[in-house]
């Protein structure tokens, strides 16, 4: 079998080249090999959203993307949304609003809500709920995360 | 035990990402039945993980976005490239104007994360009886353009489906685009029933496309999803609706015929009896809505 696939892509703003096995998911590659451990494997079937990353600025479940499909594209994980000193407004409000319990869903949740913050600033409560329906949280019940998004909007 | 299989890696395959259509067709023709096409991948990755398929070669379409993507109106036709994602369809002004039912369905497919990469061509190729894009396309009289090394052919969208999760594509053939009439007089809408509102497969979906002039329906189509081995045109309902008076009584009659046209089964999402009932309720609801939107309250 011809093996690895050469890829060149951008990961959290930095150019990255690698040779990767085609039979792995982007989720496994990012978490296990690329060092971006915020990317969590939950269901591995595209239901739970814990592995959500931005692929060319759109939120995707990275467990449903083949790793070699990133060639030539831009990937942003929760690590790339902001820094500790300059977090994304949604990241900052997740801290302020205590929108975290066990934490496993949070990187994916932050990626989706940062996208809603950046791309759907007018989204109503019902629309926010529709857009975040692909991120399951089994601890907090979603209200704190929605409050965090709205607080971030208020301060923007 | 499928849950344990997720712990094991997907069996190895060769990955090809052709840059031109000739390269694509060469890759498809050169590997016979061992080849699998990937577009968005949201169905394919599940099939790989569950060992429903074990291709030797996976051919990625994503470098062919110029040839197989885009949404445009040209000479009275709305053409949606096979690689158009549901997010692109949901936000396209052309789709909103000429194919509202498809926009409504696209906005309900999966989740934001799925809609961001899942493609219209992939949804049709997977040929799930519950594919949400299919009833709107059938109602709107869409045709699908298929391409292979030897040329292209067009099929009415319902003929792309050969059975549950079986498409009628020939070896070496891909879905290239979907064409529908860009006719501003046609009103269409889609709705569905499912066990919850989001992130769920439809138990029943219904699309209706028609126009109303002088109190009568013009050419009309009612299409049904998840109530037959494939998405279907409800023939008796469509025939009875076309040319008939646009009244609530007629909506009742057409809805009852749509239930007769359906051939549902019982499964984890709904019983056959309940599905048939839902076909009637949802069809009636869409027709009443069409009447009130066109003629005012």
Image (spheres, helix red, strand yellow):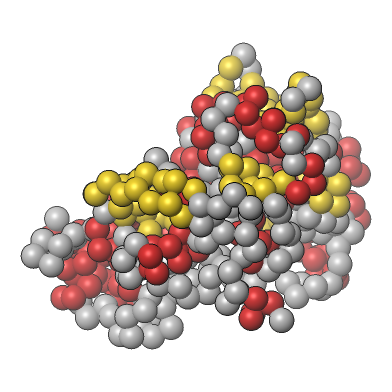
- Residue A141 picture quarter: bottom left
Is residue A137 or residue A144 the one in the foreground? A137
Q: Residue at (46%, 55%) from the top-left corner?
A: A20
Position above or below: B157 against A141: above
Residue B269 % position (x, y) = 73, 72
Q: In the shown orientation, is residue B132 left or right of residue B66?
A: right
Relative height, residue B8 to residue B282 (above, below)? below
Residue B124: quarter of image: top right
Left or right position of A37 against B105 = left
Residue at 64% across, 32% down: B24
- Pick the residue in front: A119 or A44: A44
Which quadrant does the C terminus of chain B fall into? top right
Q: Residue at x 82, y 56 (%)?
A: B164
Q: Quadrant of the N terminus of chain B?
A: bottom right
Q: Quadrant of residue B146?
A: top right
Q: Residue at x 23, y 58 (%)?
A: A81
């Amino acid at each position: 079998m011809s093996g690895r696939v050469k890829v060149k892509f951008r990961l959290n703003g930095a150019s990255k080249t690698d040779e990767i096995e085609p039979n792995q998911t982007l989720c496994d590659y990012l978490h296990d090999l690329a060092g971006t451990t915020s990317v969590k494997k939950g269901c591995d079937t595209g239901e739970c959203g814990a592995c959500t990353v931005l692929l060319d600025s759109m939120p995707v479940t990275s467990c449903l993307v083949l790793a070699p499909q990133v060639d030539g594209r831009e990937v942003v994980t929760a690590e790339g949304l902001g820094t500790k000193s300059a977090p994304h407004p949604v990241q900052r409000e997740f801290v302020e609003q205590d929108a975290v319990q066990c934490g496993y869903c949070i990187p994916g949740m932050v990626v989706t809500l940062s996208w809603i913050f950046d791309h759907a600033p007018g989204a109503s409560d019902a629309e926010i709920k529709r857009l975040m329906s692909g991120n399951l949280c089994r601890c907090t019940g979603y209200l704190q995360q929605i409050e965090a998004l709205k607080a971030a909007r208020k301060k923007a | 035990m499928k849950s344990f299989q997720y712990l094991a890696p997907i069996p190895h395959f060769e990955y090809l990402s052709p840059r031109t259509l000739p390269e694509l067709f060469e890759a498809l023709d050169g590997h016979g039945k061992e080849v699998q096409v990937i577009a968005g991948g949201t169905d394919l990755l599940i099939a790989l993980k569950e060992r429903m398929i074990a291709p030797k070669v996976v051919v990625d379409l994503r470098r062919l976005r110029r040839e197989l993507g885009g949404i445009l109106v040209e000479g009275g036709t709305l053409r949606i490239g096979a690689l158009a994602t549901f997010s692109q369809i949901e936000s396209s002004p052309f789709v909103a104007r000429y194919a509202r039912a498809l926009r409504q369905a696209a906005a309900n497919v999966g989740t934001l994360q799925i809609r961001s990469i899942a493609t219209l061509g992939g949804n049709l190729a997977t040929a799930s009886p519950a594919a949400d894009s299919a009833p709107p396309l059938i109602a709107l009289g869409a045709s699908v353009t298929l391409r292979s090394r030897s040329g292209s052919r067009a099929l009415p969208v319902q003929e792309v489906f050969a059975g549950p999760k079986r498409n009628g594509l020939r070896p070496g053939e891909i879905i290239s685009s979907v064409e529908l009439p860009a006719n501003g007089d046609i009103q269409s809408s889609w709705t569905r029933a499912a066990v919850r509102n989001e992130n769920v497969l439809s138990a029943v979906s219904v699309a209706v496309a028609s126009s109303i002039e002088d109190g009568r329906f013009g050419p009309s189509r009612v299409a049904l999803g998840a109530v037959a081995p494939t998405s279907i045109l409800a023939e008796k309902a469509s025939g009875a609706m076309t040319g008939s008076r646009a009244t609530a009584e007629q909506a009742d009659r057409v809805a009852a015929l749509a239930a007769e046209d359906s051939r549902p089964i019982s499964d984890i999402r709904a019983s056959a009896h309940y599905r048939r009932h839902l076909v009637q309720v949802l069809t009636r609801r869409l027709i009443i809505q069409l009447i009130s939107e066109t003629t005012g309250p």
